[in-house]
Each structure stands twice: as structure tokens, then as C-alpha cells.
Amino acid sequence: MRHVTPSGREAFFPASELIVSKTDTKGRLTYANRLFCDVAGYGEAELIGRPHNVIRHPDMPRAVFKLLWDAVQQGREIFAYVKNMTRTGDHYWVFAHVTPSFDGSGRIVGYHSNRRAPDRGVLEGAIIPLYADILRLERSHANPKEALSAGCRALSDFVASRKVSYDELMFSLKSAA
């Protein structure tokens, strides 16, 4: 895959449809539905076996992905707002539900994600400003570990300031919009 530069243009997908993907435990795509391929601008054959982060937008705070990965690797589901990037550099927002997939013995064998179109009010009123603040903080540190740590603290402090758990916050934003 080639390096893609953000275009600043936003892409949208129907609110009635879901973007679906599955990965192995290393985050490599094992399944991508047609909508995922269409919105991201890649053919299925180009995506399968590639890291899911092929669609990661550089405006996404690393702290959000750490929170997401920590949850699913511990066997928990998580909901998160994510800004992704298409093959052409356009971006699209999703409200993602990511869950671990288990084998018959209860071992995690991969991850499954359903993504829906997010509520614009939630994005503009809470998520976009929050992510911009966290990203600015992360980028203010030259050391990647310090940057991630600072971003995680900022995200944790934001959630704590609302006096709810992260999951409760995601749904309170969703229901309040």
C-alpha cells in the first residue's frame, strides 16, 4: 500500500448500513464487507491479510487505539468514535463496536468490528474537539512513549471529569445528541 496524504474531504456512507470487518489477533484483516471496501476505496483482495490500520487517519489520537486494543485483548467489547482514511485521502467517521472473537476453549482468535455512521452532533460537539486536544498533546512530545502516555492521561481525565465509565460516556454522548 502506498502512503496516502489526507485530502481534507469527508466521505459518508448510509446510516442504514454497517461497515463490517474481522481481523486476526495481530490486527490483519481476514474479512471486509462490500461497504468497507467501497467506502475505503480498496478491493477486498487488497485488504485481506493487510493490517487494519491501513485506513488509520493521522488525526486519530494514539490513546484512543490503545484504549481500544487494551479492551479487546482483555476480552471486552468496546465502542469508539474513529476517523478513518480512504485510499484517496478522504476521511470518514464511524461509531465502532469492536468485540473479541473466541474459539470453543474461550481463547481470543480475532476481532470483529461493526461500524455505523455516527451522529454529527456528537462528533462536532464532543468527539472532534476532544480528539484534537488529545492529538495536540500527543504531538507536543518528541518521545512516542511520553506522547502516548500523555494522550492516555488526557483521555482518562476527560472520562473521569464526566463521572462515568468510558462505555457510559460513549452512550451518554450518543443518547444526548
Image (tube, grey):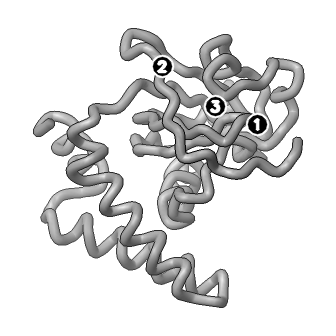
Residue type indicated by callout 1: Asp
Q: Position of residue 162 (x, y in %)?
A: 15, 63
* 30, 44: nearer the viewer: 44
Dot in front, 1 or 2? 2
Element carrying mark 2: loop
Q: Nearer the viewer, residue 123 or 108?
A: 123
Q: Secondary structure at mark 1?
A: loop
Q: CA distance from mark 3 to mark 1?
A: 11 Å
Task: Give above or below for 152 relative to 16.
Answer: below
Crowd band around label 2 with a 10 angstrom C-alpha radius: few (<14), some (14–19), many (20+): some
> Taking 53 as reference, is 72 left or right?
left
Q: CA distance from mark 1 to mark 2?
A: 25 Å
Q: Is residue 78 above or below residue 64?
A: above
User: What residue is shown with label 2?
Assistant: 13
Q: Residue at x 67, y 39 (%)?
A: 108
Q: Earlier in the sequence, mark 3 or mark 2?
A: 2
Any mark on residue 24, and which? 1
Q: Nearer the viewer, mark 3 or mark 1?
A: 1
Q: Can you tell which mark lies on residue 102?
A: 3
Residue 118 percent location from the top left of the image: 35, 32
- Residue drawn at (72%, 25%), measured in percent from left and top? 41
At horizontal 42% and vertical 24% (from top left) the residue drawn is 116
Residue 54: which quarter of the image?
A: top right
* Residue type (three-letter) at the residue carrying disc 2: Phe
The answer to whether residue 23 is left or right of residue 159 is right
* Residue 55, above or below 30: below
Q: Earlier in the sequence, mark 1 or mark 2?
A: 2
Q: Toward which corner of the image does residue 48 lie, by quadrant?
A: top right
